[in-house]
């Protein structure tokens, strides 16, 4: 197993005023003779679109996204819409057999656990961003101004968190810059979707020690390495899938990773970032695991308007941590998700804490 030279890569393409890092879309493949282009009109490929987010008048970011079954919501990475401040507007665009489809987002919801780190340290973008990233909650759901037409395919998320992600290979689809494993991403975006396969590996603390410095929550992540077939390039074990093996490249953030299940194809991961040299052999990529309870509850809260009254931190339990989350929301602002407004008065106040303590937990202060 070779030592890795680490360089953090984010899936963000930026124009206008410079944001850091200015990186483009891409998928890097193993086969130098294959183009791996997804033809327009391919059902699964047509679920994947580009997401353009505006941050004021001079800053713009581009990522990938996927249409959810409501057809009025798209799933992407939180850092695509929450960089220096929250995006002021966003557009999802799909290329279909009948022409391009572009829809504006009417609402942008960032995972509250991701958002909270900015609220705690609003003066430090770097500290807030990295702290948020390592929680494994780099997700955002956008509500579209209208439902997507039938030419755009929708795909549901994986909710079975028994470990199906590790039972087979996954398919990733994304836009933009591309290349092959020897050099990594070398070609500029050409507006075409490309695809490739990989396998998620179980988390090993001694293999990815750098993550632990930030308090990594491994249950919310999916890790994969880019194998060349040589032991020297295997960062997480195994020799890969041969010529179909691929890695996510910088700018691929928000793109879905699909697996097959008995119930049909499901989105199991959302591209967040990675370590390595230009996504070349031996690089490690990390996706957000949507089947973790913390993540699937957020997605369903926004897209399906499902609420778990009292579970304000979305962990599956109602306890003192939910009380702390309400206080943090009052003090630091927090994400304005409706599930924190327990009494339905349009804001989060001490009255919501009372509702949680006395009505839902059926206890009293100091008990």
Image: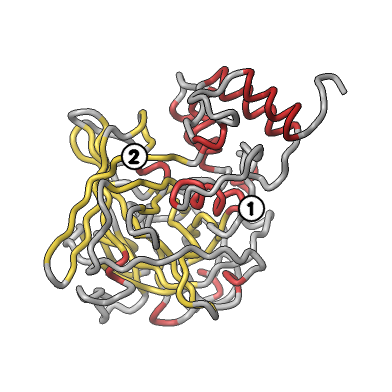
Q: SS for tag 1? A: helix
**Quarter where residue 105 is shown:** top left
Question: Is 163 displayed left or right of 182 in the figure?
Answer: right
Q: Which of the two residues, 287 or 148, is positioned nearer the viewer here?
A: 148
Q: Which quadrant, please, contains the N terminus?
A: bottom right
Q: Which percent across, then down, holds residue 175?
A: 27, 61
Q: Which residue is mark 2?
A: 107
Residue visible at 40% across and 62% down? 256
Residue at screen point 20% across, 66% down: 192
User: In the picture provided, is 150 more to the left or to the right than 130?
Assistant: left
Q: Is 133 drawn above or below residue 282 in the view shown?
A: above
Count the numbered circles shown: 2
Q: Position of residue 356 (x, y in %)?
A: 70, 30
**Tag in front: 1 or 2:** 2
Res 95 label = none
Looking at the image, is 176 positioned above or below residue 306?
below
The C terminus, quarter of image: top right
* Camera sees residue 84: yes
Dot 1 crowding, Cα within 10 Å, few <14, some 14–19, many 20+: some
Q: CA distance from mark 1 to mark 2?
A: 29 Å
Question: What residue is drawn where x is 58% and y is 43%?
Answer: 135
Circle 2 packing at 10 Å, graded few (<14), some (14-19), many (20+), is some
Q: Give x and y (percent) for residue 223.
A: 55, 60
Residue 194, position as x, y percentages in the image: 28, 69
**Image quadrant where residue 323 sits:** top right
Image position of 181 with respect to 287: above or below: below
Q: Which residue is mark 1?
A: 218
Q: Quadrant of residue 79?
A: top left
The residue positioned farthest toward the left in the image shown: 99
Q: Point out the tag, 1 or 2, that comes first from the N-terminus.
A: 2
- Visible in this render: residue 213? no
Residue at the (16%, 62%) spot, across then down:
190
């Amino acid at each position: 197993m070779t030592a890795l030279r680490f360089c953090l890569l984010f899936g963000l393409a930026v124009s206008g005023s410079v944001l850091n890092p200015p990186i483009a879309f891409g998928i890097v493949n193993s086969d130098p003779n294959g183009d791996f282009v997804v033809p327009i009109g391919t059902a699964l490929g047509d679920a994947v679109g580009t997401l353009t987010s505006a941050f004021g008048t001079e800053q713009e970011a581009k990522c990938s996204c996927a249409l959810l079954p409501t057809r009025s919501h798209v799933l992407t990475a939180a850092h695509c819409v929450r960089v220096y401040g929250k995006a002021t507007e966003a557009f999802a665009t799909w290329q279909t057999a009948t022409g391009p489809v572009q829809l504006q987002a009417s609402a942008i919801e960032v995972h509250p656990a991701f958002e909270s780190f900015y609220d705690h340290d609003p003066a430090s973008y770097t500290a807030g961003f990295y702290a948020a990233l390592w929680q494994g909650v780099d997700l955002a759901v956008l509500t579209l101004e209208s439902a997507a037409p039938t030419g755009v395919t929708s795909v549901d998320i994986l909710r079975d968190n028994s470990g199906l992600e590790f039972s087979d290979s996954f398919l990733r689809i994304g836009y933009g810059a591309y290349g092959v494993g020897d050099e990594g991403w070398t070609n500029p975006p050409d507006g075409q979707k490309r695809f490739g396969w990989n396998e998620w590996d179980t988390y090993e603390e001694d293999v990815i020690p750098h993550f632990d410095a930030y308090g990594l929550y491994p249950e919310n992540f999916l890790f994969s390495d880019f194998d060349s077939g040589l032991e020297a390039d295997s960062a997480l074990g195994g020799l890969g899938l041969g010529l179909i093996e691929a890695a996510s490249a910088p700018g691929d953030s928000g793109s879905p990773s699909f697996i097959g299940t008995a119930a049909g194809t499901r989105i199991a991961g959302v591209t967040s970032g990675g370590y390595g040299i230009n996504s070349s052999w031996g690089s490690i990529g990390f996706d957000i695991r949507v089947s973790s309870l913390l993540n699937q509850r957020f997605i369903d809260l926004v897209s399906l308007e499902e609420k778990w009254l009292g579970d304000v931190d979305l962990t599956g339990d109602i306890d003192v941590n939910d009380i702390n989350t309400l206080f943090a929301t009052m003090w630091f602002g927090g994400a304005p998700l409706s599930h924190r407004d327990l009494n339905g008065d349009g804001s989060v106040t001490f009255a919501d804490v009372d509702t949680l303590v006395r009505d839902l937990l059926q206890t009293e202060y100091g008990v």
